[in-house]
Image (cartoon, rainbow, N blue to C red):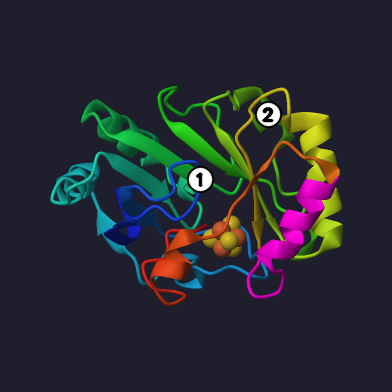
Amino acid sequence: MLYVSEIFLSIQGESTYVGIPCVFVRLAGCNLKCRWCDTTYAREIKDAREMTVDEIVKEVKTYKSWLAEVTGGEPLLQEDTQELVKRLLDEKYTVLIETNGSVSLKDLDKRVIKVVDVKCPSSGACGSFLMENLEYITEDDEVKFVIEDREDYEFAKKFVEDYIKDRTTKILFAPVRPVLEPSQLAEWILKDGLKVRLQVQMHTYIWKKGEKSPSH
Ligand code: SF4
């Protein structure tokens, strides 16, 4: 049984899969309280639907998409998430899981593409990243930093240099809008010649903020 906040079809707004139609399964409940969280409604399980893995897979299959993302909240807090991911993979979906990085990735199916957050100082959850998770990040996985200011940028730059750059090249730097303009973050990245990808949330350009938001 899983606590589900919502299941919906949208355009993937983040990651290297940006722009592709994707069905999102947003699970409810989170162990963090990021200051700029844009899915606060999914942090608690009280308003969630209780669904079996079978029911979720059945609903996912009603949408026309080959890409599926399991997100949250923090999806890895729920025991049956592993089974859900496996079932979607067995149904031949390309599956992404977006996680806040604080919960172990150890038992995840090797076929899933992990999009792993590393929380920066401005989030209020800096230090929540489970360092042993580095061991499970492969070149197919993606690591995301949400950046609000220069302090966050310097933190992310150092973390990439110290721990990420030899594990994956799929490194996402995303500005907190509207606090940090993408152009400012772009200038910092260009000046330092970083091997990272600037990420703006495509869905916020397509729809008004908050609508169909797939972000973590
Ligand atoms: S941004 Fe993600 S990890 Fe942070 S509180 Fe919101 S749902 Fe939890």
Q: Nearer the viewer, residue 45 or 5?
A: 5
Q: Residue at x 32, y 43 (%)?
A: 68
Is 115 positioned to the left or the right of 159 in the image?
left
Where 72 sits versus 156, above or below?
Answer: below
Where 215 sits versus 171, above or below?
Answer: below
Residue 37, x across and y down, in percent: 59, 68
Kindly tell me whether residue 10 is visible in this rendering.
yes
Q: Which residues are magenta?
A: 176-191
Task: Identify residue for label 1.
Answer: 15
Is 100 positioned to the left or the right of 6 in the image?
right
Dot placed on the residue nearer the N-terminal end, 2 or 1? 1
Q: Nearer the viewer, residue 17 or 212?
A: 17
Residue 173, x across and y down, in percent: 67, 50
Task: Identify residue for label 2.
Answer: 134
Q: Residue at x 66, y 23 (%)?
A: 135
Query: Which quadrant of the render holds ligand 1?
Result: bottom right
> Within 10 Å of the Cα at label 2, are there few (<14), some (14-19), or many (20+) other Cα atoms?
some
Q: Is residue 177 magenta?
A: yes
> Within 10 Å of the Cα at label 1, are there few (<14), some (14-19), or many (20+) other Cα atoms?
many
Residue type at mark 2: give it.
Leu
Q: Residue at x 33, y 53 (%)?
A: 24
Residue type at mark 1: give it.
Ser
Q: Secondary structure at mark 1?
A: loop
Is 148 positioned to the left or the right of 110 in the image?
right
Is 54 positioned to the left or the right of 14 in the image?
left
Q: Report the mark closest to the observer, 2 or 1.
A: 1
- Magenta span: helix, strand or loop, mainly? helix
Q: Residue at x 64, y 30 (%)?
A: 169
Q: Secondary structure at mark 2?
A: helix
Residue 146, x across and y down, in percent: 67, 56
Q: Nearer the viewer, residue 114 or 86?
A: 114
Q: Is residue 3 magenta?
A: no
